[in-house]
Image: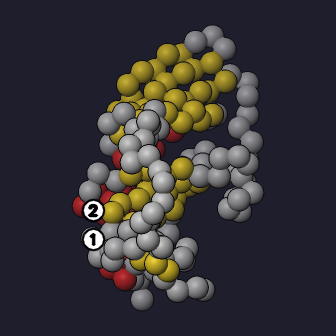
Amino acid sequence: MAGPSTLPSLEGLHYRPAMLLDGFNHVAVLTSDTDRLHAFYTEVFDVAVAHDDPQQQLRFSILHVGPHTEFNVFELHGNHTPPPQVPMFGRGRLDHIGLQAASLEAFEEIRRRLIVRGACDEFVTDFGPVLSLFFRDPDGLEAEVCVPNPNAQPGVFNPPGTPATRYSTS
């Protein structure tokens, strides 16, 4: 495993300091069981079901997962969701999503809830500026929860697999 790396200086680079985007609006997901998916996200993350529209051919719902971010959930009647593709980078165009915890305390509560449900192990990755916890939802969607690392050192990035010392299980 490689050690921490530091970023080169951004001095002299020509870039636009302001972005034209403000993050993601939504991610569309398919499920074979909307009620199960709603229960998972409301019970683990305290998200709100903002809209739920059962129609003849499909059920469409919206889960608010952040101030301006949603899951658009589609359950197509008679459509069976394919089994999850577990190996990272073998999952198709969208490999996984990263959710942002509201605070370190929220991250720790989410982690506790995910562990209780068996949706993740206890390992937390220290990427340097961010702490990360991977989990799998009831439909097999691989995702992670991220939070700013209170012990981050400016410019230092750790490789995947670097354990966060504050969550050591040994």
Q: Residue at x 46, y 78 (%)?
A: 6
**Does any portion of residue 107 appear in the rendered image?**
yes
Q: Residue at x 51, y 39 (%)?
A: 37
Name the image quarter holding residue 116.
Answer: bottom left
Which tag is nearer the camera, tag 2 or tag 1?
1
Q: Are marks 2 and 1 in contact (CB under 8 Å)?
A: yes
What is the three-letter code of the residue carrying label 1?
Pro
Using the image, determine if residue 112 lies above or below residue 98: below
Question: Which residue corresponds to mark 2?
Answer: 104
Name the image quarter holding residue 79.
Answer: top right
Label 2 residue SS = helix
**Does any portion of residue 38 appear in the rendered image?**
no
Of the two numbered discs 2 and 1 on the same chain, state the one appearing first in sequence. 2
Foreground of the two, 144 or 14: 14
Q: Quadrant of the N terminus?
A: bottom right
Q: Quadrant of the C terminus?
A: bottom left
Label 1 residue SS = loop
On the image, the x and y values in percent for residue 110 come to 35, 57
On the image, the x and y values in percent for residue 94 come to 65, 47
